[in-house]
Image: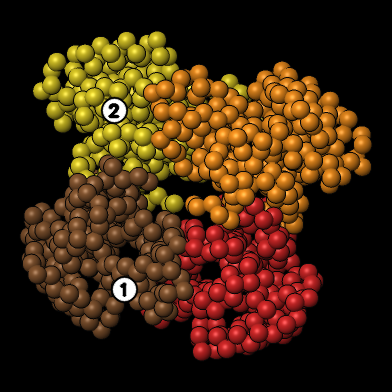
Chain colours: A yellow, B orange, C red, D brown
Amino acid sequence: MQRDRPLALVAGAGAGLGQSLVERFEAGGMTAVGLGRTRPDKTAGLFHQIDLADPEQVSPLLADLIAAHGAPEIVVHNTAELVIAPFAETSLAEYQRTWTSMVQTLVILGQTVLPAMVQSGGGALIVSGATASLRGGATFSAFASAKFALRGLTQSLAREFQPQGIHVAHVILDGIIETARSKTLHSLDPAKMMTPADIAETYWQLAHQPSSTWTQELDLRPPSEGF
Amino acid sequence: MQRDRPLALVAGAGAGLGQSLVERFEAGGMTAVGLGRTRPDKTAGLFHQIDLADPEQVSPLLADLIAAHGAPEIVVHNTAELVIAPFAETSLAEYQRTWTSMVQTLVILGQTVLPAMVQSGGGALIVSGATASLRGGATFSAFASAKFALRGLTQSLAREFQPQGIHVAHVILDGIIETARSKTLHSLDPAKMMTPADIAETYWQLAHQPSSTWTQELDLRPPSEGF
Amino acid sequence: MQRDRPLALVAGAGAGLGQSLVERFEAGGMTAVGLGRTRPDKTAGLFHQIDLADPEQVSPLLADLIAAHGAPEIVVHNTAELVIAPFAETSLAEYQRTWTSMVQTLVILGQTVLPAMVQSGGGALIVSGATASLRGGATFSAFASAKFALRGLTQSLAREFQPQGIHVAHVILDGIIETARSKTLHSLDPAKMMTPADIAETYWQLAHQPSSTWTQELDLRPPSEGF
Amino acid sequence: MQRDRPLALVAGAGAGLGQSLVERFEAGGMTAVGLGRTRPDKTAGLFHQIDLADPEQVSPLLADLIAAHGAPEIVVHNTAELVIAPFAETSLAEYQRTWTSMVQTLVILGQTVLPAMVQSGGGALIVSGATASLRGGATFSAFASAKFALRGLTQSLAREFQPQGIHVAHVILDGIIETARSKTLHSLDPAKMMTPADIAETYWQLAHQPSSTWTQELDLRPPSEGF
């Protein structure tokens, strides 16, 4: 095992925040591995193309990674599946898909990595939330419902695993993340967006919080964002 | 259509709160119809045995009921699927089942009744929440996750449908409901439990709140319950 | 003592919600007494002009009322002191005044009535909150700060006095109340305001909630109000 | 002006967290100045004995400090006034004192430093909250009421001043802070307390968050703390 460069996993490592997290963890001296359905054009660190909602794919891959690198010291859950539509125009399949992509993936990821992390004596699990984790919205019934679920799951994991030495944090990302795609979609001034590298820095700090003071939840937003 | 006794639907009408709601709505002069997987030994009002998570079963039945009675004036979502177990001992199937039983059922119910209610110009949709709607717990990861999801969905529906004239309320039931079953399971003094008839009375009041003041969320607990 | 018409107190009984509460309690067969700095032009029930922030005025008056009528069955705290200004333009005196008018008055009122209510075995204390009880605002630093304080105080009283048989509820009034004054000040369509009589009806219901199910907090808003 | 060592102010700089903050800011290359009613036995950095609730004392001192060092880059509000007693045994004077010590002090501090900070183009104002900022308690009516007020004020300041370039953060300290005094008072294992130096590190990180991602609120608790 290559303990000199401890393992960091980023589940949901697409272009944007996912890749910035991989970069930040690599820069911090870790072996950072991105996981996701779609390989980004450019990947910092390693990348494994995988359906994170399929336990048959996740379990053997993570077992191999843990065997090679030891239990991960940082695990980020960052999958996203945005649906924006009125209730009547949101299909049952879309509700199932948002839940499967965001909640089922954390169940599988957590059940695979947490036992090894507890055994190794530590580490951090950080989950990406959104404005919709705290408030529903007229056209966000599927997305908000899944993000609320993710928050309830993360809070439950914190209550169960923090006494066992694993830091479990939930980050409310309250703003638009600046990516090539969001700059195309939004009319918002990029100066008012959150840069992925800045967000990644906070995840890094969270994962390295002093041992007697852990944050379970924080929000992040641009200075100019109303809330 | 028998408009003289307007329709009330209780999805999740088992013994306990479900049946008390049916009774209260009948007593209030409504045609109250209970829906659920298991027919209770005694049923107030009508009861249809049905899998509320199956749109193929729900749609035709509710279409028939609406054809016969008009759009419902009160719809209660009261399905429950309690799982209490540590994270590692909660199967993926249990996560899926709690979500399907509590969230998918509201999606299907809402998509079936809300268009008719909007068209008829009013009505109330009331959703039963729990302590776990607001906080996760070490052995409640599946239940809390689904109850959080239900709250996010309900809040989204309120934001979308209240401006269209439909009152959408979420009730935090913060305590043990007194039922034949709970009296067996819990060592709690029944005098410290919530009686189903008392809860039903609040749902009735919610459904009849004055027209300029609607409650989106309230909590209910016994006087003696710590919180 | 005239127990046939039990006592209801409304602290902050100006024109608008205060007077509608007095009316509702009178209509419900109670002896309703309004208290406040300014006597409204028309008063339903009795009215005592009094500075509710001055214990020297409040204690003897309430002692007299309790001697004459018994412990109150309903007590409403409804004082308001609205300040809207940027932080730099809000004087320290205004911060003190909002706190004194809204928080100090509840301390004095509670300390005067709660012992008698506990001794008499019951009753309800209902406190009027606002949107600003849950969120601060750029020009609401004084008002939000005092409304937050009032909520923290009310929640503490609920935790202390509900086990002693006194129902303590906090109502989030999330919208504009229709009064002669608000119709002048706001460009909002009165059809989108909350009518004081409708709000009063909910307070009445809260004060008469079934004995095993008490609401500690609920929100009220017009159907058309965004939130 | 000695811009080479920018100014940090700690209002409420007693032994424990206050002094650890002064130390951390000094170690970070700042001129750290502690302010408070009681001079600690040992003081890191500078200390000015002052009644923070008295604008006549605060304004000239801070004007001098700003003239000498420039606008502060970090300002921490950390005053505390703990009262634990049943409602009936908490005097009106104690309510006034908790409010004055914790809320009035932030009004005065903010009105003195924020204009200079806005003019200088940046800086962070960090406010210490507590468990009681989010929930009342049976014997915490005075303390919770003041801590709620402080949170409402801080949130209002964030909404007003973040768009002007000042980061305003609120830290929920959810646990016992390890100090000489708390080790005497509490039977809690010191290993389960938060160390002041660890908390100070998080304040430092907050004050240096990347420019596009600011945290308005976070919680801190020991890994073993239930919540």
Say which amino acid is labelled 2. Val
Q: Is mark 2 on a helix, strand or loop?
A: strand
**Chain name for mark 2:** A
Q: Which residue is drawn at 39% across and 69% down?
A: D85
Asked if badge 2 and badge 1 are on a common chain, one would say no
> Residue beneath label 1, please?
D101
- The percent position of residue A191, horizontal first and vertical second, equals 33, 45
Q: Which residue is drawn at 21% across and 13% down?
A: A67
Q: Which mark is residue A75?
A: 2
Q: Is mark 1 on a helix, strand or loop?
A: helix
- The percent position of residue D161, horizontal first and vertical second, equals 35, 61
Q: Residue A127 sits in which quadrant?
A: top left
On the rendered structure, is C1 left or right of D227?
right
| D13 versus A203 height, above or below | below
Give the crowd class for mark 1: few <14, some 14-19, many >=20 residues within 10 Å: many
| D153 versus A17 height, above or below | below
